[in-house]
Amino acid sequence: MHELRSMHKQPVLLLPEWALLPDGPHEKWAVLVEQGRIAATGPAAQFTDSETVRVTLPRRLLMPGFIDAHHHLTQSFGKALVFGEPSEIFKRVWVPMEQYMDAEAIETATRLAAWESLRGGFTTVADAGTRASVDVDAIAHVTSEVGLRCVLSVICNDLQGGAPTATREQIVTLAQRHLSRWHEDELTHPSLAISIPEAATDEVLVAVSALAREARVPFQTHLNEHLAAVERSLVATGWRPLQRLAHLGALGPELLAAHATLLTSDEIMLLRDSGGAISYNPVASAWKGNAVAPALLLSELGVRVGLGTDGTRSDAFRLVDAAETAQRLAYTMAAGDSSSGGGWRWLDQGLRGGADAVGLRGKVGEITPGAFADLLVVKLDTPEFVPSWDLEWELVRLANRDQIEAVIVQGRLRLDRGQPVGWDGDTLLRKAREISARIISAAPIQRVDPSAGEHRARWKAQHA
């Protein structure tokens, strides 16, 4: 896609065979990109200015970049350690690993995760905050340099193991400083986070959620994810996590609740009535969950729903496929609902739904005038799309990241056929192998499930 490498320097008219708009695919549609934003769209025949640079994209789909509504960018070194592990891996893997990560490790892990996200078709990610002892500026620096838009959280916990670690005043100062830092960074958008509600006192939960509400940024937290978490909250506070937020008045449209897999009927109504959003993370449910969030029901009731990876695998097309499949297996199959959202709904949740959930509604996740030019060029001239009868369903069921030829963020080409533009990916991979080996060997990580090879050996021994 060499013709796109200079598009950030001048207005460019993109002329794909198809464009994915909010109301579905349109053929022979033009998209004018200027100064990092979508300046205009319409039928190609309407654009007659001969002086504008025109880039024709035959047998290509131009679509918005996907939004990952729940990620952990600094955890990329450990993602392959948690396969087969039971639910609360944060205690045994993530916290020990991140506590051993220095500035070089954070920079490398974040760059690796950002590249993987872009390769998978994500142009925006919501990072839920790192437990590593580095300033989150290190994360913002990398994501901006790589070209990944990031809704970046700072963790505002004031409890650890039930013991206080900071005062309310210290947490408020931390949060206010974070909210004021990113005005000059076009790709970084602030957010506040509390890891799980039990990691904060009532006073801090109320203060942090109020600050997020006032600033109109997301308040991210892991909510009602596992049976252990629900029971822990009941024992410590007398409330289920989501009910506790409602009881305190800390449940509102600022909420971005990761997972929300274990919801009672009254909690579903609380979410609907409060205007809160959830990140539906189907791959995380499959890999380590107790349940699948009722995303289709929530969507029908008007709850705001985006899709998130939880740092599992950053592949947007596989994510939307998993979103549809998990709902089908967990809910709609038993009811005889073979449509299971009609295909389009899962694309919509990965695009506009995700944008709304992370606080960027109308700015990302759609091709409309005024939105950021965060775009994917997808090759349709492949066996997966020939013949093509229903493009939206085909994107959910058949598309894969190998078909993404170009990733554009803020009107600038960031990846060309999966490879970074302007920096050396091979050097990063070599560095990541070396540093990850150092970190993983030093950190006191505890795995419960054996590796695949150990599992096979045990099985063979038992069946000898």
Image (cartoon, grey):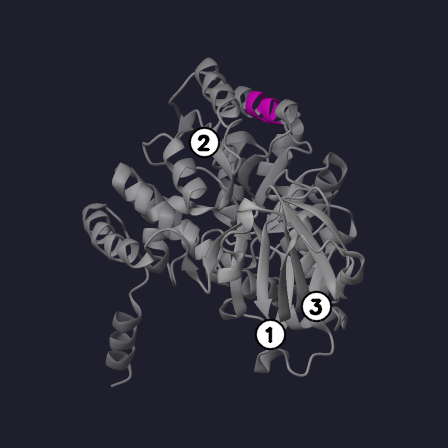
* Left or right relative to 391: residue 71: left
Find residue 155 and name its label.
2
Task: Indicate whether 53 appears above or below 9.
Answer: below
Contact? badges 1 and 2 (CB < 8 Å):
no
- Viewed as shown, does residue 319 lie left or right of 437? right
Circle 3 crowding by C-alpha within 10 Å: few under 14, some 14–19, many from 20:
many
Dot 1 amino acid type: Leu
At a point 38% along the width and 62% down the height, the residue shown is 83
Q: Earlier in the sequence, mark 1 or mark 3?
A: 3
State how far apart marks 2 and 3 are (Cα).
Answer: 37 Å
What is the x, y in percent for residue 443? 23, 45
Q: Earlier in the sequence, mark 1 or mark 2?
A: 2
Residue bounds of the magenta highlight: 206-212
Dot 2: within a 10 Å radius of its alpha carbon, few (fewer than 14), some, or many (20 or more) residues?
A: many
Q: Which residue is mark 3?
A: 392
* Mark 1 neighbour class, 10 Å CA radius: few under 14, some 14 to 19, many 20 or more: some
The kind of secondary structure element at disc 1 is loop
